[in-house]
Image: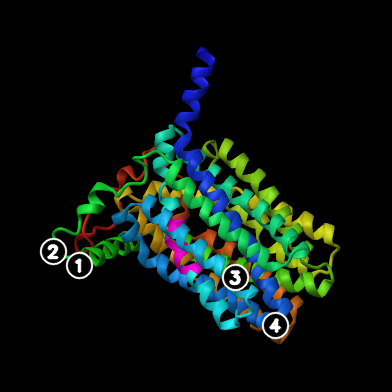
Amino acid sequence: MAAAGAQKAGLTRMRPLAGLLAALLIAQSGTRISAIAIPWFVLTTTGSATQAGLVAFCEMGPYVVIKAFTGPLVDRAGPRRVSWAADVVSAAAALLIPLLHLQGVLSFGALLALVAVIGAVRSPGDLAKEVMVPEAAERCGLPLERATGLEGVVERLSGTVGPAAGGALVALVGPMAGLGVNAACFAAGALIVAVVLPRGMGRPHERSATQGADAGTVEAGYWRSLRQGFAFLSRERLLLTLNAMIGVTNLLDAACVAVFIPVWAKESGHGAGAIGLIMVAFSIAATAGSLAAAAVAHRLRRRPVFFLGWLVAGAPRFLVLASGAPLWVVAVVVGAGGFGGGFINPIVGAVTYERIPPELLGRVRGIGQAMSWAGIPLGGLLAGVAVTGLGLTPVLVVAGIVYFLTTNLAGLRPEWREMDRHRGKGRADSAGPLASADAAQPAS
């Protein structure tokens, strides 16, 4: 009886993080499925890599722009409420695509519009879930690096389940089935947030809910809140450099997923199944890397692990696709990159959560992620144009070189020495009280 009671207490203690991670896993898996289904649908119906890139642009363009401005909304309304509402609307928009296709009225313009709606609404939903990670870790009594490591595991698992299911659905049933599953995943994520998370979790931060009172209007409070986020981030050189570097790598990663890999699979004759295979290889290895990071990252120096992960996860993926190597070789190289990449996001998350005060977390993280994701909408679009004009192989080689230079040259900047400085301290302990944007002082 005592053992059963202790086990039940342990499960209850882990409920906040377990529920949040489950919602993330389901919603992100659905997004990964659509990331295969939509480009393959466009490629097979139009034969145009440029139009496939345009679809990716129409989803990620609104995603990035809205994320820059949605932080005050998440801080003010509360991340739980925002997450639930965003998943419900995303489910409805995703379900409309296969329904319109079945009726024979899905034009390319309508597809672009619905994809844009999904991207726009998914942006605050993703941010809201991420903002709840530190609260969940605190409620469960876990170190922040372990919680962000588990968040990385979930991200990688979704990258395993999603592509595997997406590749199978596209190959066996067709791409529209993937969009139906995507809608179901969004709906399930909304249900988990509403039912499983503890009742008091994800509420508006007390300061954020009242900070607009001095301004006299909601509008003034919103813009004041946004200025506070920009002011804080502008004096955080480490976060600025981190976001700028990730912005370049995200552009290249988006180009690889949206255009390079699908075009490679089509030109090589491997088909849609190969897309799922190499994405699964990357994600399984990345899941192992994230599990290792969750277990040991809080004992390691962050900076050398961070840059070693980039060295393994970056350029080799592009160069092996350009080499004409057999499918199994591509899968092995991509898998090795996935293991190295599994250590990156937990470190990024821990550094970010540590350096941002809780009352600023939504808006500062939203602005920072908008910076680091700014290249994603352009990735597929530019890649489609480049591949159409120059061919796949030369573009892959150039992309690999740029990836290598970006991740290595950025590491020479002096602010990277601050990456380990906050270890052992509370989250943003030294950040001080919330200051107005007009009175912000340089960080010490």
Range of residues picked out in magenta = 118-127
Q: Is residue 119 magenta?
A: yes
Give the residue number, with chain letter if any, for mark 1.
220
Q: Residue at x 37, y 53 (%)?
A: 81
Give the residue number, with chain letter if any, for mark 2.
216
Residue contact at pointers 4 and 1, CB within 8 angstroms: no
Residue contact at pointers 2 and 1, CB within 8 angstroms: yes
Residue 329 image offset from top left, x and y in percent: 83, 58
Give the residue number, with chain letter if any, for mark 3.
99
Tell which circle, 3 or 4, labels the residue nearer the N-terminal end: 4
What's the amino acid at mark 3? Leu
2 or 3: mark nearer the eye? 3
Q: Residues within 10 Å of mark 4 (few under 14, many from 20)?
A: some
At numbered mark 1, what does the secondary structure look like: helix, strand or loop?
Answer: helix
What's the amino acid at mark 1? Ala
What's the amino acid at mark 4? Ser
Classify residue 407 by image quadrant.
bottom right
What's the amino acid at mark 2? Gly
